[in-house]
Amino acid sequence: MNDLCLVNTPVYELQDDRLEPPLGLLYLATTAQKAGFDVSICDLGGIEKDLWSLPEASMYGFTTYSTTYGRTLELVALAREANPDAIMVAGGAHASALPQLVAEDFDHVVIGEGELAVCELLSGLTKEKIITGYPVEALDKLPFIDYSFVDTDSYHRIVDGKKSFTVLSSRGCPYGCLFCNSIVMGGHKRVRFRSPSFVVGEMMGIKKRYGDVNFRFGDDLFGGKRSWMEEFVTESKHLEDLTYRAFVRLNQCASDWGFTDMLAESGCKHIAVGLESGSDAILSAMGKGITAQTAIDGIRQAKAAGLLVRVYLIVGFPGETWRTVNETIDLVAKTKPDEFVVYPLIPYPGTPLYNKPGDYGLLDVDEDFTHYFQIHGNKESQFVYDLADVDRVGLQKMKDYMVDELEKMQLSWARDSKGYV
């Protein structure tokens, strides 16, 4: 019997629920194993319900998300069948946002990062019902991920046409965009970095074991410190044929210190950026910390450096009108990114928009979290609130119009792009 079984809840609403292994659970499993515990991961991503099966364990850990929380509770019931005496632990975004509510269904709830908290639970060092998972300060002390916990051949993520592995170079983001659910996990707090040599060392190890693969950085914000980026460019030269994609910000790309050239020099081929809107009024209301001109300059510099650019757009932030929708379309037409995704605004639990919807003009907010999907299926989505001047039906028309107009420009929806998923 395992000391700990970590369970990944399937998300059937996704077009592909088997893109990549659950990175957070891999960090937990590797850390707990290094501490001397017997750990397993049960990744049920893409697995039909009639094939669900959990091994017997003394403790079960679940990463919770608002949209699939009900499905997670079904797995908790299955775990109790496997071992009625087992301890049930919840972590992740939903548990961190609504710990008191989730504590009604679990023995323990971990808020924030879980590596230290899970080891304390396994060691019997804490009995608290709700546990604050304090951030790991020295990220280099975390072990390289042990991918033997999962079947790496079962995942489909590709970068530049090749199988890819996701790595982290940092945790946290210094920005506090009002809609971003990274806030829930403390993502708006001080950023902690792994050393560039450590990151490159992990990628070298992955390549040695798995062959000719590429990488995706899963950081909220990659290369967020100039000195770190300069050192990473130097260290990347030790890794032959390094190819990666990353999430970055447009103000980084628009900077005058050569950020986009550093990306290209270190092996980056593709970036994803949160453009969100082409309206200065909407960008300001979101707390994005950029202007439309910053976005224009950033996209142009990225393309000049030879990078493929994917933009993420949001429709429906309070203040959205047909005029602001067309401002976004005009900015995209002016800058010609390579790929795009258009999301509806979702007031995720734990964000200011969820905590005080009336303060931001969100009306009649749907309380059914199963509707809180940014994208499900093939470009499908829905709005879960009304605004004073436009209801959710009108917001959906705005989103559909934006998608149609961008496709007329022959831009690729991200899932339709060749070589990158």
Image: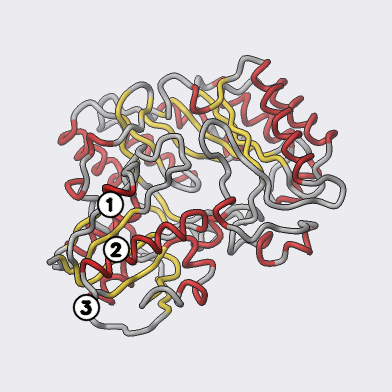
Q: CA distance from mark 1 to mark 2?
A: 9 Å
Res. 123 mark: 3
Question: How would you rate the neighbour count of disc 1 (Cα within 10 Å): few for under 14, some for 14-19, many for 20 or more?
Answer: few
Q: Earlier in the sequence, mark 3 or mark 1?
A: 1
Q: CA distance from mark 3 to mark 1?
A: 29 Å
Look at discs 2 and 3 and give the one toward the viewer: 2
Q: Is residue 230 above or below residue 169?
A: above
At a point 41% along the width and 51% down the height, the residue shown is: 170
Question: How would you rate the neighbour count of disc 2 (Cα within 10 Å): few for under 14, some for 14-19, many for 20 or more?
Answer: some
Query: Residue 281: x percent and y percent?
Result: 81, 44
At a point 35% along the width and 54% down the height, the residue shown is: 24
Q: SS at mark 3?
A: helix
Q: CA distance from mark 2 to mark 3?
A: 25 Å
Amino acid carrying label 1: it is Trp
Q: Earlier in the sequence, mark 1 or mark 2?
A: 1
Amino acid carrying label 2: it is Leu
Q: Are marks 2 and 3 in contact (CB under 8 Å)?
A: no
Q: Relative to residue 312, is residue 205 drawn left or right?
A: left
Q: Foreground residue, 83 or 412?
A: 83
> Would you name the residue on which mark 1 appears?
52
Q: Earlier in the sequence, mark 2 or mark 3?
A: 2
> Would you name the residue on which mark 2 appears?
78
